[in-house]
């Protein structure tokens, strides 16, 4: 058996154990979150200290902005409403790849590039 095949088999077995452990942890986390839930506090952290432990659950709300509609209305909004919105620049990889070398050099003054962790995928055939 090749080294790569052995590693692939070991990774599949480890991934199966990991998936099982993650599913069990998520089930337990859901039960803990239900125990500590305060209907009067939909956001924030609740902490309890049972004997020998500190258990904290942070509850949050996901908010999505309709950026196109916001941009159209932006100049008509009160400053207090504008202050409730942050704008974050991000790189368009498609646009980045389309830049001429001189344009890429200009943008590089404002962008830091670092390699990401390699993503490994192993599938049984």
Image (cartoon, helix red, strand yellow):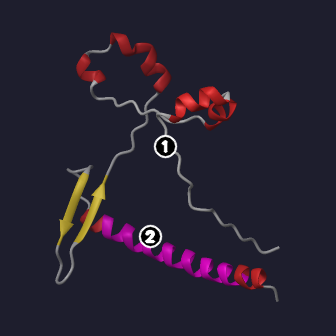
Q: Over which residues does the magenta segment extend?
A: 9-33
x and y percentages locating residue 16 in the rendered image: 62, 79
Q: Secondary structure at mark 2?
A: helix
109 or 42, nearer to the observer: 109
Residue at the top extreme, as displayed: 76
Q: Which residue is mark 1?
A: 112
Depth check, mark 2 against mark 1: the one in front is 1
Q: Which residue is mark 2?
A: 26
In the rendered structure, which disc, 2 or 1, sits on the residue that comes first in sequence?
2
Q: Which mark is residue 21?
A: none
Q: Is label 2 in contact with label 1 (beta carbons under 8 Å)? A: no
31 or 92, nearer to the observer: 92
50 or 11, nearer to the observer: 11
Is 25 contained in the magenta span? yes
x and y percentages locating residue 6 in the rendered image: 74, 85
> Magenta region's main secondary structure?
helix
115 or 13, nearer to the observer: 115
């Amino acid at each position: 058996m090749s080294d790569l095949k052995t590693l692939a088999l070991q990774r599949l077995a480890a991934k199966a154990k990991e998936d099982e452990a993650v599913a069990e942890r998520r089930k337990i986390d859901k039960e803990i979150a239900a125990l500590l839930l305060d209907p009067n506090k939909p956001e924030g952290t609740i902490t309890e200290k049972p004997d020998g432990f500190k258990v904290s659950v942070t509850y949050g709300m996901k908010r999505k902005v309709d950026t196109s509609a916001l941009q159209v209305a932006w100049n008509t909004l009160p400053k207090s409403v504008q202050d409730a919105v942050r704008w974050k620049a991000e790189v368009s990889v498609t646009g980045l790849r389309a830049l001429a070398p001189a344009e890429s050099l200009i943008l590089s003054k404002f962008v830091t590039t670092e390699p990401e962790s390699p993503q490994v995928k192993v599938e049984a055939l």
